Amino acid sequence: MTITTNDDWQWVNGGYETAFATTSDPRVVAVIQREDDRSISELFDGDAINPIIYVSHRFGELRFHHEAGYEGGDEAELMQRAYDEWGWNGTARRWLWIFYGIAAENAWGGDDRDGNWIVATSNKYNEHVGNERYVTYEDARKDCEAIAKELADALDGQVYGIGFATNEARVLDSDDEIDLDSFAWITEIEIWGYIGEDYAKESAARFDGGEPMLEPMLELPAELNEPGFIEHTDRMANSAADGWGKN
């Protein structure tokens, strides 16, 4: 069974926790659902992900902590050394780049007033993932931009699970409201951890987590779809009810 999804996403009950889109099968809607309990270290776990650094602000001092991603380049420790020597300024950043090939980009998101987040990269990381060394600082910094945007989305709570909801009794498209909170609909979230609303919707629309296992819908025989057949049948039924054709 191949299901296609309509581009008509709707948020449930006017909130931003669950959204659905209708599909080519009236019994099925694609679903995304917000995930609230996943940490940054879980979402960005893996040594093929840029180093992610949390910078805590305590007593007027900055402390750099590695939180996720690749940690083989000691980026957090070297940033701390640079900050302790010069403060977090242009001199510190130039030193990190010239001697260690490290560049960084801030990720703005969330409401944490006790710290901020940095996405870093380095020639050591770049070689680790099989890429050539950076030519310029700007090349390295730009390489952080995409994951910095993804990290900002995660900090803003744009983390979702994808799946679908089914109502096997809904065999025809209808303008009736689809209420996923009712017992008629069964929601199944197949995969969690999608970052970014657009990405989650695109993935759910493709049923990247798998399609529901439903029996094929019965199709009317071709002759039943001929123009006028249903109207003719209705007229015959009404005539029979009125006694037409009795001896």
Image (tube, helix red, strand yellow):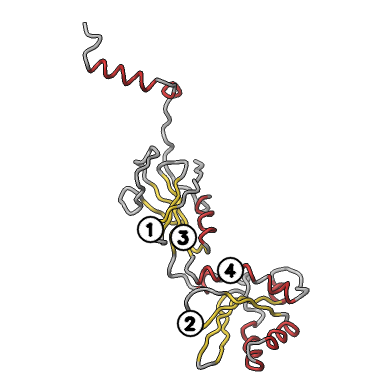
Q: Which residue is mark 1?
A: 14
Of tags 1 and 3, the one toward the viewer is 1
Which structural element holds mark 1?
helix
* Residue at (73% x, 68% y) in the render: 131
Q: Measured from the top left, where is residue 84 in percent x and y?
A: 63, 93
What amino acid is labelled 2 in the image? Arg
Instruction: Give the residue at mark 3.
Output: 161
Label 3 packing within 10 angstroms: few (<14), some (14-19), many (20+): many
Q: Say which residue label 2 marks.
A: 113
Left or right, 71 with respect to 156, comes to: right
* Residue underneath mark 4: 149
Which mark sits nearer the N-terminus, 4 or 3? 4
Quarter of the figure with residue 226: top left
Q: Nearer the viewer, residue 159 or 235?
A: 235
Which dot, 2 or 3, sits closer to the camera? 2
| Count of marks, rendered view | 4
